[in-house]
């Protein structure tokens, strides 16, 4: 889907701190498409790609019927992309490795540091976490696995109350690339990691050349 960010109305803009386009995209997709909104999704400059259980025609119809007047020309459906779903292929995913325990959510690296009492290897902790997520999704993804820590990202979360109060926090973002083996449908459908409704965790695949 192509998005004209300059035309996004003020009511869907986020201006606190850094601009969190992930949250803005979440609001935009839910406002326009409601249950037809893709999730997980990924933002590529002026384009949003994501997983949807609905057909191209169903999504286009929903877009035509549900788009409010002030969002006309903001978002355009540019056709469906069929995800590669072979038994072996290349993958890339930008994931948020957070873990929630006893009502507290934080970086799995920080959980590991607290548990072990020493500073562990950050990339190794992320690698272990990622491989666990892949097992849950029914795939093996340790072949030629590369882990790149992209740093912290500032995110904005808003309560949908009368005054639209919100909070700003920082989350770790990690890029995983490599070769997977197995049926990738569940990983593509569900995504990897936390905050999948806000532009993170889309499991991208392609064939091996």
Image (cartoon, helix red, strand yellow):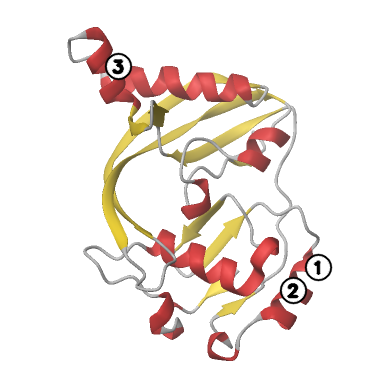
Residue under the point 64% across and 34% down: 187
Crowding at label 2, few (<14), some or many (≥20) Cα neighbours within 10 Å? some
Q: What's the mark number on residue 62?
A: 2
Q: Name the disc covering residue 112, or none.
A: 3
Residue corresponding to mark 1: 58
Q: Earlier in the sequence, mark 3 or mark 2?
A: 2
Q: Secondary structure at mark 2?
A: helix
Quarter placement of the N terminus = bottom right
Q: Secondary structure at mark 3?
A: helix
Q: Residue furthest front?
A: 162
Outermost residue, bottom side: 69
**Looking at the rendering, which quadrant does residue 99 occupy?**
top left
Distance from Cα at disc 1 to Cα at disc 2: 6 Å
Residue 40 spot, x, y in % from top left = 58, 49
* Residue 22 - label: none
Mark 1, residues whose alpha carbon is within 10 Å: few (<14), some, or many (≥20)?
few
Q: Is residue 123 above or below residue 206?
A: above
Mark 3 and mark 2 residues within 8 Å of each other at the beta carbon: no
């Amino acid at each position: 889907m192509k998005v004209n960010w300059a035309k996004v109305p003020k009511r869907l803009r986020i201006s606190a701190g850094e601009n969190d386009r992930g949250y803005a995209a979440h609001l935009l997709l839910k406002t326009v498409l409601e249950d037809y909104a893709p999730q997980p999704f990924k933002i590529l400059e002026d384009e949003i790609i994501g997983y949807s259980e609905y057909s191209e025609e169903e999504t286009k119809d929903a877009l035509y019927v549900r788009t409010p007047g002030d969002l006309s020309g903001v978002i355009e459906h540019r056709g469906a992309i069929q995800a590669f779903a072979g038994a072996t292929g290349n993958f890339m995913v930008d994931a948020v490795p957070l873990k929630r325990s006893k009502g507290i959510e934080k970086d799995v690296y920080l959980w590991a540091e607290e548990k072990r009492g020493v500073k562990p290897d950050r990339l190794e902790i992320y690698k272990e976490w990622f491989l666990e997520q892949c097992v849950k999704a029914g795939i093996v993804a340790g072949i030629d696995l590369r882990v790149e820590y992209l740093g912290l990202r500032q995110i904005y979360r808003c309560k949908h109350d009368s005054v639209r109060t919100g909070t700003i926090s920082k989350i770790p973002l990690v890029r995983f690339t490599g070769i997977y083996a197995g049926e990738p449908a569940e990983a593509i459908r569900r995504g990897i990691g936390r905050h999948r409704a806000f532009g993170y965790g889309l499991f991208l695949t392609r064939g091996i050349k």
